Each structure stands twice: as structure tokens, then as C-alpha cells.
Image: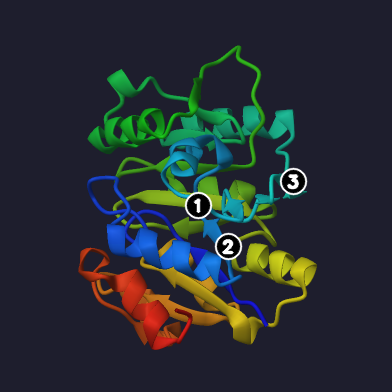
Amino acid sequence: MRNALFFDIDGTLINEKGDIPQSAYDAIKQCRKNGDLVFINSGRCMGMLKNIKNKIEVDGYLAGCGTEIIYEGERIHYYLMPESEKNELKDASDRYNVDLIIEGTRGVYYHTDVEYSRFPVMVNVKELAVGSGCEIFQDGDEYEASKFCIQSDETSDVSSFEKQFSDRYIMLDRHDGFYEASPIGMDKGTAIDIVLKKLGIDKKHAYVFGDSTNDLSMFMCGANSIAMEKHDTELEEYADYITTDIENNGIRNAMEYFAII
């Protein structure tokens, strides 16, 4: 039975310089040569995965916290946010004093002009988006969306914002006032379930690799879970194996431990 491997990106597959370590690249290439399947499983929507496609060949993408799934170039799952909901999010971000990012299959929309944002981190987030090769949208542009993120501080009313959308979205606290929201019933774990069901692969032959809180649903889905050496503590309860640092052959070491390669 072939295996299916699912990789988070930042801090797991890609280092702080934005590169895939050679050991990880070679290990993934070897397991695909052996007949196993490799997937990117990211909170980023497809619009922010363009550069990843140029760095490494994989069999598919689970993007936007499970809102879009691509397998062998074919879209097999997709959630499209209603236009009215995008407008509701913009109004709510103004009302509750948060910065808003709406993400979609082509790119990202920033409700607040980053140049004038009170959050320096927003500049870094936009630089990441631009560096990822995605489009940047403004009011008046036509774009599809699937999920959103907000940045807050002590002047924000996050609880009221969350309450307004609690019937439609789950908001994940990514720390330091940053929240990532995906539609109820869609996350990195449910995306894995969809792929495994389509391919007829049992979870005992599925392996997930991650390092942060938005990987928690992957770790809870019942597959073999590998945490990188530097990881959020929330993952530890569900980790089957904690590997070495990304720069210290972490991906290869985990694959060897599980006899994947």
C-alpha cells in the first residue's frame, strides 16, 4: 500500500530563508520515486502557493485550511465565500477595530492600507504574500475568497467580531492577536480525509508533518503525526514523533524513522 504524506510549509518544509533544505527535497523526491504521494497542506490559499510550485514537485495541494484541494492538477474540493459575506467582513473589521485579510484562490485582499496600518506585522504578512507570487486586491477588484485572517490589539473587540461569524467560521488563535478563520467543517484535517477517501488510502498509511497551531487539525485526524523540533506546545499531545530541526535533516529523519524511505 502506498503512503500519503502531508506537509505544512513554513517552519516545516521551508526554513526562515524561504528555502527547502536539500535533505528534505531529496527525501521527498525519493518517497515519490518509491510510489508514495506527497501533498502540501497549508493555511495559505492557492494564490499564495505559486512559488512553492516552483520549488518542488508534489502530487497535490490542500490549500486555505481545507477550502480548496487540488490533486494531479484537478480541483476536487472548493469553498467559495459569498460576495455579501466579504462585505460583511469589511464592515465588521471597521466596527470592531481589527485589520482584515481575505484570502482566495488567486490572491489576497487587505482591507486596511498596510502602509497606514498600526500593526507592523501586517507589512511582513504583505511582503510574504508578494513574495509568494500572489495577486494583491483592493476595493473594486473582482476576486474569489475562501477564508480570512484578522490582526488585533487591546483596542480591538475580537469577541464581538468572532460572535458575529461564529455560525459560519472557526477562528484559530495564532498568538499575538492574530486569528485565522476557516469555514465550519473545513480544516487541514478534513482536507486529509477527503484526499484519503478519494484515493482509498487508510490513515495508517498517512503521515502529517507540522509545527504550529494551525496544524492541530492535521494532528488530530488520526494519521501518523510528526512535529518538527521547534513546534507549538499544543501539538505535543497528538504527536506520534518529534523529529529534529528543519535544518538538521528533520524531514528525512522522520521518514527514516517510519521506514518511508
Q: Are marks 1 and 2 in contact (CB under 8 Å)?
A: yes
Who is closer to the viewer here, 210 or 60?
60
**Mark 1, residue position:** 43
Of the residues shown, which amino acid type is indicated by label 1?
Answer: Gly
**Mark 2, residue position:** 188
Residue 55 image offset from top left, x and y in percent: 41, 44
Residue 150 image offset from top left, x and y in percent: 44, 42
**Mark 3, residue position:** 74
Quarter of the picture holding the N terminus: bottom right
First in sequence, mark 3 or 1: give its number.
1
Residues packed near mark 1 inside 10 Å, few (<14), some (14 to 19) or many (20 plus) = many
Residue 213 falls in which quadrant of the image?
bottom left
Residues packed near mark 2 inside 10 Å, few (<14), some (14 to 19) or many (20 plus) = many
Please state if 235 lies on the left or on the right of 168 as rendered: left
Please state if 104 lies on the left or on the right of 228 as rendered: right
Distance Cα–Cα, label 1 vs label 2: 8 Å
Quarter of the picture holding the C terminus: bottom left
Please state if 155 lies on the left or on the right of 52 as rendered: left
Residue drawn where x is 21% and y is 69% of the image: 248
Give the total of numbered labels: 3
Distance Cα–Cα, label 3 vs label 1: 19 Å
Q: Secondary structure at mark 1?
A: loop
Q: Secondary structure at mark 2?
A: helix
Residue that extends furthest to the front in the rendered view of this protein = 33
Of the residues shown, which amino acid type is indicated by label 2?
Answer: Lys
Q: Secondary structure at mark 3?
A: strand
Q: Is residue 182 above or below residue 229?
A: above
Residue 206 falls in which quadrant of the image?
bottom right
Q: Is residue 257 above or below residue 79?
A: below
Q: Is residue 154 visible?
A: yes
Q: Is residue 106 above or below residue 27?
A: above
